[in-house]
Amino acid sequence: MKDELNYIGQKIMKNKTVLAANVTQLQANLLTNETLEESRNESSSKLIELLGRSLIDNQDVSNEIIEWAHNEASFLVDNTTLTTALRSLAYYRTVIWDVFTEELEQQQFAAITMLDVSKIIDPLLDEISAEYGNVYQEHNNNLMKIAYTALEELSVPVVPINKNVAVVPLIGEIDTHRSQLVLEVTMEECSKLKLEYLILDVTGVPIIDTMVADNLFKVISALRLLGVETIITGIRPEIAQTIISIGVDFTGITTFADLPTALSSIDLKIIKTN
């Protein structure tokens, strides 16, 4: 039995180039022309060699298999779906079994040899499938992080009014994470735009409690160090009542009922300065 497996393994390794071309031909219906460059034949040949070696004296090629799978999946992830990648992987099994079936008939190997080959080859292909899944999952996670970061940045839009003034319309809840984002974005934009005034419009903030107020104070203090005067607008009457009832002190912070009033005040300051 061992001799039969060694024979098949050596046969596969000897004909790896031809077998790789057969795999490429079978994959042509699934993969685009872009993924069927000459380098793909080299990659296919490498896997076939590893599968052949696994049959010779039951060599342990697991680490090399995983490395191959990672490299292959890293290429495929930008070119095709995971479903298509897994379907294309099945063609290696097809090509290997074609070789085995031919030798089974010609050399009259024992029928149990078929089971022994399967016990060795199938787990290796399963390892490749698992690594494909890992690479694709990591890729998707990275895309989600990028999309989430972009969405977060859009949630803190800094809108320039003129060369001195910009407005940040805040909408939704302001938790610790978002307040940190507000701080980072406003500091970066104020420095880049060389702003003198920044208006934080909280009309769309549903509630201002001690935590939200504390977060806003941190933003205002940090911007003050940059020489930016921060103004808060849009505190609705019911929000004002809540602020008073919980004892939040806005003393020292410039507030206005609405954006137009704040802009008028800034214009007056600029006129007096000039």
Image: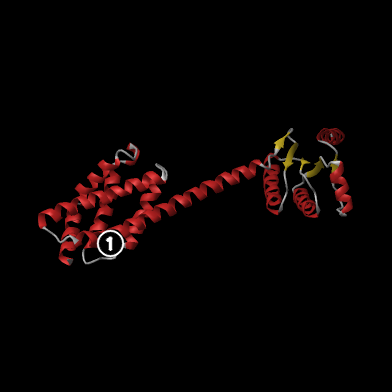
Please report the residue visible at 80 percent of the width from the left and 49 percent of the height from the top: 208
Depth order, front residue of 6/156: 6
Q: Position of residue 263 (x, y in %)?
A: 82, 34
The C terminus: image quadrant:
top right
Residue 250 visible in rendering: no
Compared with 176, 56 (above or below) is below
The image quarter containing residue 171 is top right
Depth order, front residue of 6/194: 6
The N terminus: image quadrant:
bottom left
Q: Is residue 183 left or right of residue 122?
A: right
Identify the amino acid type marked 1: Lys
Compared with 56, 160 (above or below) is above
Q: Is residue 44 left or right of residue 110?
A: right
**Element class at badge 1:** helix
Please report the residue visible at 32 percent of the width from the left and 60 percent of the height from the top: 123
Q: Position of residue 179 (x, y in %)?
A: 71, 50
Please report the residue visible at 28 percent of the width from the left and 58 percent of the height from the top: 121
Q: Position of residue 154 (x, y in %)?
A: 64, 40
Q: Position of residue 193 (x, y in %)?
A: 69, 39
Compared with 266, 216 (above or below) is below
The residue where tag 1 is placed is 119
